[in-house]
Image: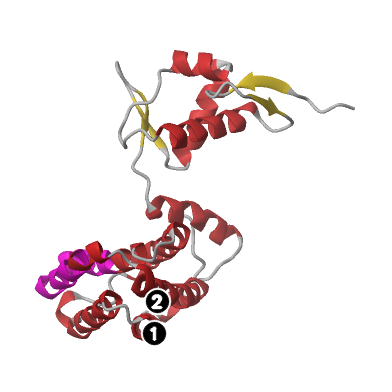
Amino acid sequence: MLPNIMSGFGSSGVTWERRSEKVSEIVAREIVRDIAKRRPAPNSVLESESAMIKRYQVARGSLREALRILEVHGLIRMKPGPGGGPVLSEVDSRDFGRMATLFFQVLDIRFSELVEARLMLEPFIARLAAERHDPDDNEELRAIVQQGFEARSTDPWLQATDAFHTKVLSMSGNGLLTLIACALKDIFTERASTVYIANEGDHVRETHARIAEAVINGDAETAERLMREHLQEYADTVAEREPNLMNEVVDWR
């Protein structure tokens, strides 16, 4: 028996096939492909519903289901009222991490496993940052470290700490590794952010400064070692202060 095939045209005019999977899923993929090709700015309103129906040659119900798929995954949000419609979100690693936690929960992934993965991945990326980073990023990294020294209340301190790790990871020159590692960091931080408070973080501040200088100076071995020691110390502190957390399943949030 022949598979169920429906033909249509993407924005490129190239024929694509819709086989046994739902039309809405294929349309969602086509929309993503067009977004990646055109690169509209975040918060841009995409085409109207009528224009999309014409472009993707689908029924209104299938298009709305496709948009709902993208909304659930955090790529778009729906703006109501006149002039509304699908709006492109400013997606980041938190959206990726939020989606990943759905699978973590179903697969019974424990927080201790997430910590172990971060301990393996982030020091290696710190090494890459030292080896590959753009020198134009050096002053921004130093400025973030300085923000940490100046932060004496909890919220600014947590923001500076998060910014430090995000910046080092972004300097690796590998976008995929950066996305995955930042997502693990985001999940970790959301669940264990109260372990260190601002008034006891001087050792962390000094460690961040040393890691930053190793990255800036291209000392890959030192950057990797210091980051591993830093994260291990943090993981040990979490295990000591919140022992039950380490055995919890990383649930979908």
The Cα atoms of the two marked residues, 2 and 1, are separated by 6 Å
Residue type at tag 2: Arg
Mark 1 residue crowding within 10 angstroms, few (<14) / some (14–19) / many (20+): some
Query: Which structural element holds mark 2?
Result: helix
Query: Are circles 2 and 1 on residues that touch, CB within 8 Å?
Result: yes
Residue 121 in picture, x, y percent from top left: 47, 73
Find residue 127 and name its label.
2
Quarter of the image that includes the N terminus: top right
Q: Is residue 149 left or right of residue 91?
A: left
Mark 2 residue crowding within 10 angstroms, few (<14) / some (14–19) / many (20+): many
Q: Is residue 181 left or right of residue 63?
A: left
Is 152 in the magenta?
yes
Residue 101 in picture, x, y percent from top left: 49, 57
Q: Quadrant of residue 166 in the image?
A: bottom left
Is 212 in the magenta?
no
Dot 2 or dot 1: first in sequence order is 2
Residue at the spot 52% in from the left edge and 23% down from the top edge:
11
Q: Is residue 142 left or right of residue 172?
A: left
Residue at the spot 59% in from the left edge and 58% down from the top edge:
106
User: Which residue is at the front of the view, 10 or 148?
Assistant: 10
Quarter of the image that includes the C terminus: bottom left
Q: Is residue 110 above or below residue 73?
A: below
Find residue 221 and name its label.
1
What secondary structure is the magenta-colored segment mainly? Answer: helix
Residue 252 visible here = yes
| Stretch in magenta | 140-164
Residue at the spot 15% in from the left edge and 67% down from the top edge:
143
